[in-house]
Image (cartoon, helix red, strand yellow):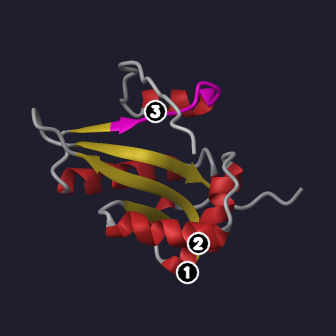
Amino acid sequence: MNVPAPITVSEVLFRPAAAADAEALAGLIGSIGYPTEAAVLRRRLAHLTAAGDQVLVADLQGRVVGYAHLHQMPFLHRAPDGRVVTLAVAEELRSQGLGRRLLQEAERVLREWGCGRVEITSGFSREAAHRFYLREGYQEQSKRFVKLLGG
């Protein structure tokens, strides 16, 4: 098996996603269990960024190897929360510090937006992700109630 050489996190550049990143984003999103076509992602990316969200990508020598979708939730009673809607790192580069660096960069952006807290949700079955977030200083909090509206 061909094992990639460890990366140096300092080699990774972080930038907002562009429409040209849709194919790479589709691969990353598919790797975490949400297969989506690049054309659909391109449209959603345009819509989300027009609405104020940011998709932050980790770029390693011109290749998108991770991303974090960032969203701001305003409140009447406190500073807005920042939300990391989704975070993914290329499978072959996991456990090398890239996820930590991507999360730190996401927190930096959310701080610039004036957010007072960061929220991340993660599916029940993603135990490795839960351990990662706990190591990074996140605490399990609240319950989330969801109702499907149909259609």
Mark 3 crowd level (few <14, some 14–19, many ≥20, 10 Å Cα): some
Q: Residue furthest left?
A: 77
Q: Secondary structure at mark 2?
A: helix
Amino acid type at mark 3: Tyr
Residue 39 or residue 119, whichever sits in front: 39
Taking 4 as reference, is 141 above or below it? above
Toward which corner of the image does residue 49 lie, by quadrant? bottom left
Which label's residue is closer to the chain start, 1 or 3?
1
Quadrant of the snapshot with the N terminus: bottom right
Categorize mark 1 by other alpha carbons within 10 Å: few (<14), some (14-19), many (20+). few
Camera sees residue 25: yes
Of discs 1 and 3, which sits in the foreground?
Answer: 1
On screen, 95 above or below 51? above
Q: Look at the image and tell me whether residue 61 can be seen.
A: no
Secondary element type, mark 1:
helix
Q: Nearer the viewer, residue 41 or 138?
A: 41
Task: State which region is magenta.
Answer: 119-127
Q: CA distance from mark 1 to mark 3?
A: 30 Å
Most common secondary structure along the magenta stretch: loop
Give the quadrant of residue 35: bottom right
User: Which label sits on residue 22?
Assistant: 2
User: Element type at marker 3?
Assistant: helix
Look at the numbered discs 2 and 1 and tell me whether their residues touch, using CB distance below 8 Å: yes
Number of marks drawn? 3
Q: Which residue is mark 3?
A: 133
Foreground mark, 2 or 3, reads 2
- Residue 107: say if magenta: no
Quadrant hosting residue 95: top right
For mark 1, what is the residue?
A: 20
